Amino acid sequence: MIINLSVSGQVYNIHIKSWGVEDGLSDRQVNSVCKDPAGFIWLCTAKGLNRFDGYSFKVYTAEKNNLPFNNLGRMILDNNGCCWIMGSDFYQDKDNNLFIFDPLTGKSISFKEKTGYNETFRFNLLQKFNDTTLFAGSSHKPYFFTWSAGAGLHKINYPVNVVRWLTWSNNNTFWVLDSANLFCEIDIQGKLLRQCRHQEDSLSWLPTQETGSYNVTKYMPGKQNTWKPVTDVDVHQNIARLCMYTMNGQYLPYKLPGNYEIGGVMLNDIVGKLEPLHRTYSSTIFIVSDNEVWISSGFGLDHITVTKNKFHRYFYAEGDEIGNNSFRTLLVDSNNLYAVNEARGLYEINLSTKVTKRFSPFAESNMRLFSLTKLRDGRLLGLREDQIYIHDKKWLVPPGRQTSNLETTWKITQISQDSFLTGGWRGLKYYNLLKHRFSDFTKYNGYKSLAASLVIDFVDDDGGRKWICSNSGLYEYDSAKGIVARYSSADTGRYFLPVADVHHIYHDTGGIYWLAAANGLLKWDRLHHKYRLFTVADGLSNNNICAVYGDNRGRLWLTSDYGLIRFDKTSLHVKTYLTDDGISDNEFNRLSHTRDKTGNLYLGTINGITVFNPDEFDADDDKITRMPLEVSFFEQFDGEIGKLVDKTAELIHTSAITLQPGDRFFNLNLALLTFDNARQNIYYWKINEISSGWISFKEPALQLSSLPYGKLTLHIKAQSGEGEWAANELLFQIDVIKPFYLRTWFILLVLIVTAGIIFIGYKWRTYRFRKENIRLDSVVKQKTAELEQTINQLKISGQQKDVLLKEIHHRVKNNLQVVSTLLSLQLSTVSDEKARQLLEESVSRISSISLVHFQLYHKDDLTGIELAGFIHELLQQIIPVYAKPGQHIHLQNDVASTWLDLDTAIPLGLILNELMTNSFKYAYGDNKEGFMKIILEQQGSTFMLHYYDNGPGLPDNYDLKINKSLGMTLIRSLTRQIGGSFSYIMKERCFLITFLDTHTRKNIA
């Protein structure tokens, strides 16, 4: 709940946030409230102790946490952060109703255990004096106790006979009523300071102003049940002081200096703004600072903060009117503010008298102007799409209305006496005031992207430049040249800036520019081309920045989609103002902002206009109270006992987490102590040893498991919903212990044991091997002798076989030579040329076969012949038979060292014999020089033999398949015999014989 309260002309914002059982509070009856040094709020209720961090309530009870009892009344904190808790008035146990609770450990001890005091005692008074001494006592006992960490417990007698306890003062004294009906002021040493007489039944009192927990204003029932306001000169404005008075207006002579107010507003006025039930049943108050207070009641908990409202709202609406109250265009002229409401048209407000009037001289009752500007002659000019309106005592429409279908235009700027530049949905237009005409803008100069862009604003800087802000970047305009530069994320080099959608620009000192963009705030050093982009990661409440203005205190003021942002250019601290702080709405309009000559900013929102002067926010306003980030709860899974263990106190003291083997995970609950909007907080964590990037999470609970072994550093930071960072960052050292089987000593031990076992095994096996070797030696010797005998026999047998095979090849060669000789003799007796030719060819073929056998028995290897040498010898054998006298034959033998078995060598030798003899017959003729080239290639088990000569080659229509000559028929037959094919390549004049090796041919067969 937000309340505006005016006191002596100053408007205050009173923020009231309430919580009840529906929010997790254990009971609606809250008897006491206080705040510990870490920033947590502690509450005593009828159903246990509650700790509140803004996000949730953590409840401690007798059943779950071994508290002595649940019905808790008053509570104070000692200097060690322990809670001294007293039972409520309804606690039935007559004695021993005070115990001490340690928030870190969650354990409690009795008053007797804490102080060593053995007597039973029922307390109904509990207070803390001078930050060190605790007062505990009873209005029904003649003595009271003081306790401090250094001095311990002291029992002190009252100096008077006390019949009724009254109240505390803020200078370490208290007031009681004695048996003589005298008011008595006593200090904590038991000394009586003063006395005065009043009637008991008309007594009333008010609380003191001091940080701490007090009873809220009450009055005692008397004969009259009406409240008479205090009229003393020091308290005539209802300022609450320590002042006790009777119903007939008589006052105690004792007054304390200083006003009892919260942030400038009287406490009674604040309490009066609470919900009726909270106001009626208020119990205690805890003052945090001069503008923050917590109040407990019979219906829950209230948090109240009071701030001065330095913002002014114009046209602010509530309820159903909010949806139609967006303001777009603003212009300040002299003492008048002109503002265009999107639904209702143009308004004029006198800033001195606050008198508002609505213009309606237009055909449409809700006519909206998209842009307003002041001409150099003092007249006002308004722009609406393709129509111009001029204000000269009244709004006039210039003659010559232009009917061209223009895109919506909503910004206008004067570039000369009668010329204007307008911008809108699609680029720029010129407007001539004398002719009342729009015309196309022609000076884009290569920056055609602007012609299709949304133009958002024109800004003139102190250096005479005109900047055009658009959704495609920031453009620089020169009055003579037109567009001369663009700066955006789509450009490179000195024209690159990490923004595209630019809404506004502010020219700062030192050549620095600040750009309000859709992705944050950009600081741009144009001279040195350095820049930095600020986003929500740097504390901004929103990345969509609508406008940026500077003030005289080194700060920037940014409008955004979520709040008004104050940005300190030196410290980079950020503060966000929301509707709770007095602005008209959290969402601002990117086209609606202006500044007058005195520095006042006028900012349009979707619900009215916010007006303020940035320089009125003085040094006190610059003080940013940054919220603490604290550990709320920490529990770790203990692998030995198999359950979660609370280790919160240990973590807070050591900031260290040790995960033993088997400790699978831990849960860490956090609290950024922003109580009113805690559910908007965002938390971040990272472990540098794992990743350098921050990981965000909304719920304030972090569970980590499966972490790598070793020493790690966990970083945690937090950010409020308004973008402000926590005052501190949490760092925790995590030591993930390796299981014993992964530790160095265990690995070394395993290696030593393994080495020992291997050594012993080695020795044993060596011994066994030695004995076995002795036995095997004798067996080997015996077998060796037998094997040598067998080898000798095989050698003799192999030598005999080699001799036999050579003899066979020799005899085959001799027999073939005899046949060849017989044919040669027969050749000399044959006169028929054709017969002679046939006999010569037969002799040649027999000679080629004979040559194979000749090479076999002349070589040591009887399994095959070497093809390259065979080809050379075969040619030498053929030349004497077929070469003409004086004819020289040149052989290019490109056959690598290749061995062919007998089954392949003989058919291939006959094929080569046929090809060579054909070359002598048909290729060389009477030529003196003959050329022959043979190439052998191998691809796997396939051989390809190319045969070339320098003859004319075969005719183009020659078909080897139908040729019936003996030579060709023999070649085709022999080629098939060796698993190949025979062809002629016309282009290369080359015979190609492909064949397979013997092993492949056998597998195919």
Image: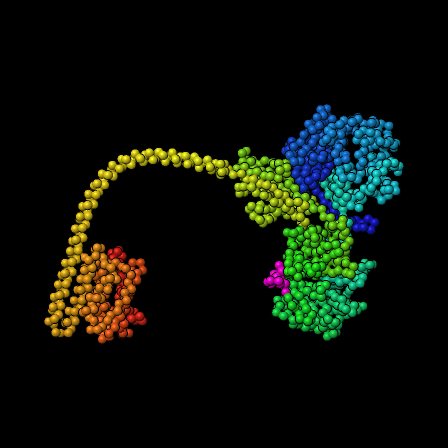
Task: Identify which residue, 836 or 10, lies in the foreground.
Answer: 836
Task: Identify which residue, 88 or 822, lies in the foreground.
Answer: 822
Q: Is residue 638 left or right of residue 585?
A: left
Residue 744 in sight here = yes
**Where residue 324 sits: x, y (%)?**
72, 58
**Where residue 744 sits: x, y (%)?**
49, 38
Q: Residue at x 82, y 32 (%)?
A: 175
Task: Identify which residue, 171 or 91, lies in the foreground.
Answer: 171
Quarter location, residue 76: top right
Quarter location, residue 500: bottom right
Q: Residue at x 14, y 72 (%)?
A: 835
Q: Is residue 444 left or right of residue 196?
A: left
Report if residue 333 lies within the magenta region.
no
Q: Is residue 245 above or below residue 414?
A: above
Q: Which residues are magenta?
A: 486-498
**Where residue 386 sits: x, y (%)?**
70, 70
Q: Residue at x 70, y 71 (%)?
A: 431
- In the rendered image, the residue lying farthest to the top is 119
Quarter location, residue 447: bottom right
- In the rendered image, the residue lying farthest to the left is 829
> In this figure, what is the number of numbered marks?
0
**Where residue 909 sits: x, y (%)?**
22, 63
The C terminus: image quadrant: bottom left
Report if residue 492 lies within the magenta region.
yes
User: What secondary structure is the magenta-colored segment mainly?
Assistant: loop
Q: Is residue 29 above or below residue 14?
A: above
Residue 585 in sight here = no
Q: Is residue 958 above or below residue 606?
A: below
Q: Residue at x 63, y 38 (%)?
A: 652
Color style of the picture = rainbow
Task: Identify which residue, 83 or 891, lies in the foreground.
Answer: 891
